[in-house]
Image (cartoon, rainbow, N blue to C red):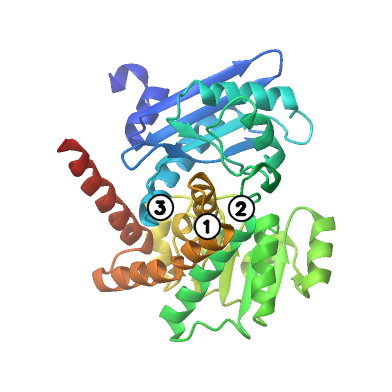
Amino acid sequence: MSDQLGENSVFNKLATQEHQKVVYCYDQATGLKAIIAIHDTTLGPALGGTRMWNYKTEGEALNDVLRLSRGMTYKAAITGLNLGGGKAVIIGDSNKDKSEAMMRRYGKCVENLNGEYITAEDVGTSPKDMEYIKMETNHVSGIPVSLGGLGDPSPVTAFGVYMGMKASAQHLWGNDSLAGKVIGVQGIGNVGENLVKHLRAENAKVYITDINEERLAMVAKKYGADVIANNQFYNLDIDIYAPCALGATVNTETLSQLKCAIIAGAANNQLADENIHGKMVMEKGIIYAPDFLINAGGLINVYSEMHGHSAKRAMEKTEHIYQVTLEILKKSREENIPTYEAANKIAEKRIADIRRIKAAY
């Protein structure tokens, strides 16, 4: 069957990453073109944000949603949440193409999955969009505080990255203080800015870059960070590299330039290829804090919202990322395996254990 369909077929892509389901949603009237991917629901319903991005091709959108949804499975498992992994992408320019009607039509698509998938915000979507989606389905989290939700999860995500960064420092240098450390934050959206806030409060020296020059200037002035052009960023002599924009920035080309001791950031899928670049990072002696663990604060936030927990409780649970990061880094060192592999093993064991328990009934 594989040979007949070809390696680029949707079915073969699903089989390769062991996805359960992919749903295409199209509505001509609103311009909605969305793909919802459900990777694994062993631990619970698949939860993951909806990303709106101007993908060049449908194939690019599919690859992104498959990779992101798989990451959500591991993210939920490693943080001890009773959730599965899912993700959705909407193809389009969020600044031009998005409308209330589109979001509500998309909400109906989510509703048709009967709770198997729960959505939340992501790149290109906002709490206001979640409000529109909630008009058509209850299977949505990350809604505004005014509607009883916990609102924007970005501060919680940033705090988790900060905890992962400090744990990495503790592992490498025997002290988790970031005072005086030189840190490069690539991408200063809501998460990146909140991370800069934590770092500057601890008196770290922070370099920042972003494609939005106006926002760069604002964040630099607000927190006392130094602006660096993106094409010069990988050559910086820094202690910690924090990728907080899109994924795949840790690749063969950038690893030939990077001069850092730790990679710890908020972006999803930072390793362009886990097997290749995870090993390259290890061989270069760089500590890599697995992204799907340290950026899990946003997921913890929406999970907390679903279960009626307070914002304070969400932050307390996110603080635990520090300890889990230490465990993964220790396992990596003891077994001489890349950190992403150590994290995957822990996540996969939890999923397998729970699958066996469920099979017993």
**Residue 274 on image: x %, y %:** 40, 52
Give the residue type that dot 3 points to: Glu
Type of the residue with mark 1: Gly
Q: Quadrant of residue 321?
A: bottom left
Query: Which residue occupies 53% across, 63% down?
Result: 160
x, y percent for residue 166: 51, 75
Question: Disc 3 designates what residue?
Answer: 274
Question: Alpha carbon of mark 1 to alpha carbon of mark 3: how far?
Answer: 22 Å
Q: Which residue is mark 2?
A: 153
| Quarter of the figure that contains the N terminus | top left
Labels 2 & 1 near each other (Cβ < 8 A)? yes
Residue 213 seen: yes
The residue carrying mark 1 is: 297
Badge 1: few (under 14), some or many (20 or more) residues near its Cα, within 10 Å? many
Left or right of 26 in this view: 18: left
Q: Nearer the viewer, mark 3 or mark 2?
A: 2
The amino acid on which the numbered mark 2 sits, given as a three-letter code, is Pro
